[in-house]
Amino acid sequence: MAKSTGFKRNNQKRKMKITYRKFQIATICILLLILAISKSGDMFVRFFIKQELQAIEKQYGLTIQYKAIVLKGLNEALIKGFIIISADSEPIVKANSIRIEIDTKKLLAKKIDIQQLDADKVTINCQALNQETESISLADNEYISRAERIVKDIFRSIPSTTTIHNLKVVCQREEKQWIVDIPTFKVKNNSFLMEIRSKEYEVEDEWICSGTLPDDKQKINLRLYTKDPAKKIVLPFIEEKWGARVKFDTLAFELSRKTKQSGIQTVQGKAGIKGLILYHELISPDTIVLDRGFINYNVNIGKDFLEMDSSKTSIYLNKLKLNPYIKIEKKTDWHIKAALDKKDFPAESFFSSIPKGIFHHVKGLKAEGTMTYHFLLDVDMANVENLRFESTLQSKNFRILRYGNTDLRKMNDSFSLVIYEEGRPVRTFKLGYENPDFRPYGSISRYLPYAIMHAEDAGFMHHAGFIPDAFERSLAQNITERRFARGGSTLSMQLVKNVFLNHDKTISRKLEEIMIVWLIETCRLTSKQRMFEVYMNVIEWGDNVYGVTEAARYYFAKEPSALNLGECVFLSYIISAPKQAHYHFNGTQIKPAFYVFYRDAVKRLLQRGWITPNEAASGNPAIIIRGPFRERLIKL
């Protein structure tokens, strides 16, 4: 009996819903009929079109002008002489005419929903658009709401049926211009395919762009490639603005928007590039070539943060797959977190995936075994002293099968070294017994290695090439002072820079330095003592003064074996800025700051057991310059 009663109730509810739906449809039909036969219908449509345009003006700080709005019934409007003007009174968009078809049902709910758009002779001025964009402030947490609004605008900006004839995009930078002509931009059923004629200066190219626009699945995707497969797409203005050159074969992009939940907007998608060619002098002295790069991304946008979810984000570089985590947060100040963990990946996949042009000496290296990498960076700009930095690369059964362009064991035997300054070779000499100025480790004062380790890298004989804590402290200081105030290089890194690399300040040079140090230290390609021996024979100790023999003679007119404790401490004192050694003197007398450094050095050497109490007590900080450097001090 209870089941029968429940069935009747459900049946009654269904009938009520059907009746209510019929009532809605009838009401809409009656209203449409009334509006259709009423002169006030035109006023109704005009009012809401103007209201929508005014809302856009207010939201983006723009001015919208038009010559006339001509209505054809309740769902069609023709806007003539349409112009969007920036806050600087520069026209951003011009259109000879724009015809729109409106969803009448939503119009009754006071909403403008464009179902179809046709436009003719449309010009977009990127220069004015760029000026407008640059004026946007990211104060407080406004950037979050802007990001969310941009995503929403993307998904509702272009109707599913759109035709634009004679679309032109003009970008001007100083006296150079880039013009894009699109004869017909047509979207049908949310899909499009168009030819693009690009002209930068006197260079003309033809590109193809295809893809889909948002539908009920809320997804956008596009693919850009050249009409001639033998050519590459060259990004315009990159070289003039940033000094870079960027070319590629194909660019693919996909973006989808998830429903907002718990105050968080999620954007996800894919992006890929093939045949990338990149050059910038700060990245690498060589042109970088990436055969294949691809990313599946998932970004959460909250009230005060942007977050890339590592569990749903994957970056592919050739054969290598990475899952990074990044979070940028803004409360009282910026807070940045980044992490990457990659466990037990084949060494072969790493070395074969390095883009061409990044590592010259390692290029072609073959290895076996597995590698594990861990990275963590946590920087709170309101509390920089508590910065966290971790970076470790470990290996298992790792073995080099074949060296690349350079045999990384070359320090074990005599080798030639070229010294570069500002990219120019200034000295060439042998590191070995063929060179009369070369001194083996045992022929150098025992105090010098200790003094250098105190000043530069106390743990050199024990660490594996890196000191994460030291890099963490230097990074915190550099961020606090907003300049490069302190480096985190170990002796191993300084040695590799001098022996294998030049002094170019590029990202690739620093990365290759780190990689070569890791290979030498992990595989024990050269002993610590031999590394220190080479270091003392190549390091710069003054203007065109290289190696311990030249330094001992230049400052003290001595052999390296005869240097006393004070003299060795002095040589370690000037390592950081050898060409400015004269600034430590008043005439031929060393300034008092050196005595503070000397006392601290002797104290540390004694604590570490590197010198005896008698040696510490008998050491003399008085520095007497007897070599050619004395003549320079007298002339200053």
Image (cartoon, rainbow, N blue to C red):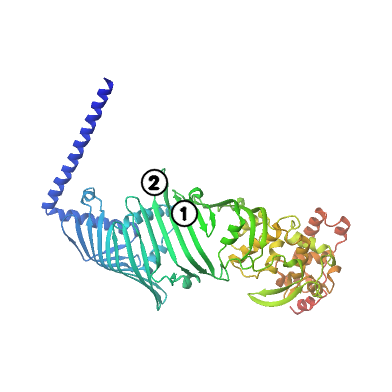
* Nearer to me, 347 or 17: 347
Task: Measure how far apart labels 2 and 1 are at the Cα level.
Answer: 20 Å
Please name the amino acid that badge 2 sits on.
Lys
Query: How far across and down, in percent of the image, does residue 385 sit?
Result: 61, 52
Q: Which residue is drawn at 58% across and 65% down?
A: 507
Where does label 2 land, which residue? 260
* Nearer to me, 457 or 196: 196
Query: How far across and down, in percent of the image, does residue 430 sit?
Result: 76, 74
Q: Are marks 2 and 1 in contact (CB under 8 Å)?
A: no
Query: How far across and down, in percent of the image, does residue 396 sit?
Result: 66, 52
Q: Is mark 2 on a helix, strand or loop?
A: loop
Query: How far across and down, in percent of the image, does residue 591 sit?
Result: 76, 67
Give the label on residue 296, or none.
1
Q: Which of marks 2 and 1 is nearer the N terminus?
A: 2
Position of 365 relative to 44 (above/below): below
Give the label on residue 67, or none.
none
